[in-house]
Image: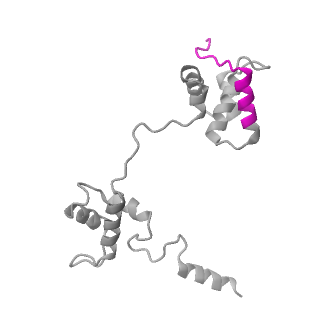
Amino acid sequence: MPKIYRIKLTTEERGVLLARQRKGLSKSAWYRAASILLLADEGAPGGSLSDTAIAKAVHAAVRTVERIRERAVCEGIESVLTRKAHSNPRLSLLDGKAEARLIALCCSPPPEGRAVWTLQLLADKLIELEVVPAISDESVRRTLKKTIFSPGEKSSGAFPRKAALRLSARWKT
C-alpha cells in the first residue's frame, strides 16, 4: 500500500536534524521524532524505510511512526519537534492567599473532639470559611505535599531522622 504522507526533507532540514542529534543535548521525545523523520526521508542517500522497520529501529510502535509522519506533512516538521501546549491546562484551586490560609489552618488546633486535622476536615473548613467554593481532600493533600506542613509528618525529608540515626549506629561496629 503506498504511503499517504511522504517525508521529503531539504538538505538544510536534514543537516539541522543530524547536527542536533549528534550533540545529544535533546530530549528523548525530540530525538525519537527526529530519528523517525530522518529514517522516513525519501531524499536520504539510502532511501526511506518502511514504517515497521522505522518502528523497530527507534523502539516505537508503528502507529507512532505513522502519527509523526502525518503531523510532519500536515503541520510541518517543527510541530513534530516541539511539544504542544495543553489545550486545557489545569488551574490550581488554591492561589497564594488560599494556600496561606490552608497552612494557617493546619497549624491551628484541630476542631473540638478531634486529635488532628484530617484532609477532609481541612477541605470542609476551607469551604466553610469561604476560601474556595468547593475543594476535595485530594486537592488539599496535593497542596500540602508541596509544603512541609503535611499532617502527621514529623520530618520534611523522605528519610526520617530516627531511621537515619539507627542506620548510622548499625554501620558503626
Q: Is residue 77 above or below residue 96?
A: above
Report the residue that reaches farthest toward the right.
45
Residue depicted at 66% across the width and 25% down the height: 52
Asked if residue 129 is among those painted magenta in the image, a careful observer would answer no
Q: Which quadrant of the figure contains the C terminus?
A: bottom right
| Residue 24, percent from left and from top | 73, 42
What residue is at 24 percent from the left and 63 percent from the top? 124
Q: Residue furthest top?
A: 2
Span of residues in magenta: 1-20
The N terminus lies in quadrant: top right
The picture quadrant where one finds residue 80 is top right
Residue 81 location (% of width, % of height) = 61, 33
Q: Does the magenta-highlighted stretch encompass residue 12?
A: yes
**Position of residue 148 in the picture relative to residue 55 (left or right):** left
Q: Is residue 42 visible?
A: yes
Question: 21 or 35: nearer the eye?
Answer: 21
Q: Which residue is outermost to the front?
A: 97
Answer with the quarter of the image where residue 49 lies.
top right
Q: Is residue 1 above or below residue 166?
A: above
Colour pattern of the rendering = one colour
92 relative to 133 in the view: left or right: right
Residue at horizontal 45 percent and vertical 39 percent from the top: 86
Residue drawn 60% across the image and 29% down it:
78
Q: Nearer the viewer, residue 156 or 59?
A: 156
Q: Position of residue 162 (x, y in %)?
A: 54, 82
Compared to residue 26, the image places residue 66 above or below, namely above
Q: Does residue 65 show up?
A: no
